[in-house]
Image (spheres, grey):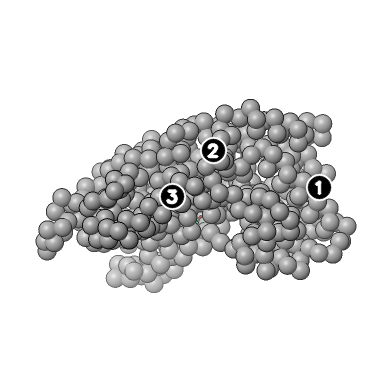
Amino acid sequence: MESDSRPTMEALKKMDEEDRLNWTRGEFEIPSVKACGGDGDGEAIYFCGNSLGLLNKKARQHIMEELEVWSTSSVTGHFSHPYSRPWKHVDRPLTPHLAKLVGATEEEVAHTSTLTSNMHNLFTSFYRPTTKRWKIVIEQGSFPSDWYAVHSHPRLHDAVLSPEQIEEAIIPLKPREGEETLCTEDILKVIEENKDTIAIVWLPLVQYYTGQLFDIAPLAKKSHEIGALIGLDLAHGIGNVDCKLDEWNVDFAVWCTYKYLNAGPSAIGGMFVRSGLDDKGKRLAGWWGNDAATRFKMEPEFRPTPGAKGYQHSCTPVLSSIPLLATLELIGKVGFSAMREKAIRLTSTLETLLRSSEYYVPLSESSRTTKDVGFTILTPEQPWRGTQLSVFITGGEEVMPRVFGRCLKKGLVGDERRPNVIRLSPVVLYNTFEDVGRAVEIFEQAIKAEREGEAGGSENGDEQRDVIGGDGP
Ligand SMILES: *Cc1c(COP(=O)(O)O)cnc(C)c1O
């Protein structure tokens, strides 16, 4: 890309002025450079919403209201609530928004528990291996929690599966030699090659490390053709990219709400179960999965609520649910398609600036081995990505943590994935085009300083990472 096609800071500021969604940033509390471990005053450039979204001002207000209700009304808040959010049904205002965001009906969606636990919950019902069909497909580079979770299920079935079958139960998907992301045709091929033995295909909608967006529709179609189920992890997908679970014909899915939905640290997750998916009476039951109409009769017989809510176990955690409402209502007001349109422009602007940098090198087989300090981008091009760009720092494994530390010092908060990657996510609801320009300036200065061997790259890096939790979700 020609360097004269690089937008200037003036041009970026103008894009913010003309942006119809520029008001949404004012709805959020932006962290300071200092508190994030940097030097200097002012607001940080927060590009880490893929890991922990920022605090919505209305979410702060809602939390304070809940504390007040707890203080003044105590247990009666479950039934009678001065802000019309009785705790007994605290999920009620949330589910319509969530259903819309994932492309499902309200009955197919439950707002409950946390991502990995929800995954175990649904695998318990829908992973029903036989000696003929017992394998699970998952990417080799999947998020560790997903990887551990799927490995744990075949072992629960040792009355059915032999030790050899348990050993061979996982089919790992790997990129082509020298490549970073997966091709749909390769995944289809793996499914075809194992068509008689696959029970479940488990995939992310957006990959946490590379930022790749998967083409779900053909993969779901293929999974069903061979007689398997398909499940999705929406951790990096929900609130980030279009999600059409019903249209794609996905069987079940799980998500968290602390990333692009800004519900706060380790907030509650959710799940989707396709209408008509039959567990043949095999599920983990709890009182919150019982029909709401008879739940408080405390009867010995379990009568599940139809749909996904019948898989809930415990009463809904109010304090980790209510912050979600603010962002869901904001998304409802803005409209997800308008948000997505701006998100694409923000990320494309970041990509244009990075690619026109003198330190940018195209991704190649030598990216991992070159000694030249610079960077490349792992994330696929539009449309096969969401908000995040995964920037791979070249020049050796010791370089990335130093670049990351230098960026933090100047107020750019991304997140690091050792050994080589810094993930940068300009989040549509609170980042600006000017943020994108300043982020690239800071990032380029950090690379330049590394090239020139300046001191000061690593000294405080680890300490700062402890402050912001660079190794968080
Ligand atoms: C963030 C994330 C998780 C986190 O799981 P929790 O159970 O919420 O701790 C799991 N899987 C993926 C792919 C993630 O990105």
Q: Disc 1 designates what residue? A: 359
Q: The disc labelled 1 sits on which kind of residue?
A: Tyr
Relative side of 440 to 283, left or right: right
The answer to whether residue 277 shows anywhere in this view is no
Q: Nearer the viewer, mark 1 or mark 2?
A: 2
Number of residues whose C-alpha sits closer than 10 Å to that of mark 3, classed few (under 14), some (14–19) or many (20 or more): few
Residue behind mark 3: 61
Vertical side of 125 occupied by 161: above or below: below
Q: Is residue 4 left or right of residue 161?
A: right
Mark identifier at residue 24: 2
Frontmost residue, 162 versus 261: 261
In the figure, residue 125 lies in which quadrant?
A: bottom left
Counting residues from the N terminus, which is met first, the one under dot 3 or under dot 1? Answer: 3
Q: SS at mark 2?
A: helix
**Distance from label 1 to label 2 (Cα)?**
33 Å
- Disc 2 beta carbon < 8 A from ligand 1? no
Determine whether the residue tagged by mark 3 lies in a helix, strand or loop: helix
Q: Is residue 145 visible?
A: yes
423 left or right of 341? Answer: right
Contact, mark 3 vs mark 1 (Cβ under 8 Å): no
Q: Name which residue type carries label 2.
A: Thr
